[in-house]
Amino acid sequence: MLPEGAPPVLLTRPAAASERLAQWLRGKGAQVIVSPLLAIRYASHLPEVPGALVFTSTHGVAAYRALGGAGGLPTWCVGPRTAASARQAGLAVQGVAPTAAALAKDIPDGAPALLHLRGAVQRGDFAADLRARGLIADSAVLYHQDPLPLSPAAKAALSAPIVVPLYSPRTATLFAQACPPEAWPHVQAIGLSQAVVDPLPISAPIARRPDGSAMRDAIMVVLGGSAVEGQPRSL
């Protein structure tokens, strides 16, 4: 169990992802405040699929399913959770990589024409990276990430020590904009990667790997009091 007086954890991911992590953390005895900074809104229709699909997030798979996407198509995914969601949607997962950069290298040269189903806001251009390798690839926006304000409970909690795990550069930027300047001394942020912590005005440790399991481990280390400012930036 966590030590007495461990700070609460503020979760800012979209609602479904935050609630999954909140349930896990509460099972470990943590106090949790859920205040999503992004709301996921699906597109109105599916684009034409040329032959194969690429998903870099579970949101893309969920939108594909919600819009009636067909199963059976060859599919490549970033991350095991995205791959599991794709399999549940009846898609034929051909490969999984831990990051988009790794997946762009791993998709084989003989892959069919690919369509990256993504959010409206993305970092980099995955389809362009595939085309640079000579593959046939395009992208289509299947969901939008609409910004949300911090909840009153979250704002109130920032007046005392608090742990804030951050999973994307977009969410980190929104949190940096929403966090009052006087609250930063109380904030112990944790980043999924260097790109996530870059928008923050404070130093923050980074998970050992850019995946959910490593982030859970990092959160527990911080809550246990093992990670403090000045220590190495990797947990």
Image: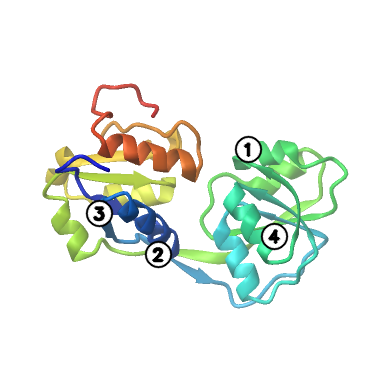
Q: How far is mark 2 from mark 4, CA to CA?
A: 22 Å
Q: Comparing marks 2 and 3, which lies closer to the viewer?
A: 2
Q: Where is residue 28 shown, x and y percent of the image?
A: 32, 49
Q: Residues within 10 Å of mark 3 (few under 14, many from 20)?
A: some
Image quadrant of residue 226? top left
Q: Secondary structure at mark 2?
A: helix
Residue 129 visible within the image: yes
Q: How far is mark 3 from mark 4, CA to CA?
A: 37 Å
Q: How far is mark 1 from mark 3, CA to CA?
A: 30 Å
* Kind of residue sitting beneath label 1: Ala
Q: Which residue is mark 4?
A: 87
Q: Which residue is mark 1?
A: 101
Is residue 159 placed above or below 194 in the rendered structure?
Answer: below
* Kind of residue sitting beneath label 4: Arg
Q: In what quadrant of the picture does the N terminus appear?
A: top left
Q: Where is residue 20 shown, x and y percent of the image?
A: 42, 59
Query: From the viewer's perspective, is 195 left or right of 202?
Result: right
Residue at the image position 73 percent from the left and 66 percent from the top: 90
Instruction: Mark 2 or mark 1: name the one nearer the start of the chain.
Output: 2
Residue at the image position 82 percent from the left and 41 percent from the top: 108
Instruction: Mark 2 or mark 4: name the one nearer the start of the chain.
Output: 2
Residue at the image position 60 percent from the left and 40 percent from the top: 98
Question: Label 4 near label 3: C-beta < 8 Å?
Answer: no
In the picture, the disc for residue 178 is: 3
Q: Comparing marks 2 and 4, which lies closer to the viewer?
A: 4
Instruction: Mark 3 or mark 4: name the one nearer the start of the chain.
Output: 4
Instruction: Mark 1 or mark 3: name the one nearer the start of the chain.
Output: 1
* Kind of residue sitting beneath label 2: Ala
Residue at the far front in the pictured view: 1
User: Viewer-proximal residue, 169 or 159?
Assistant: 159
Question: Label 4 near label 2: C-beta < 8 Å?
Answer: no
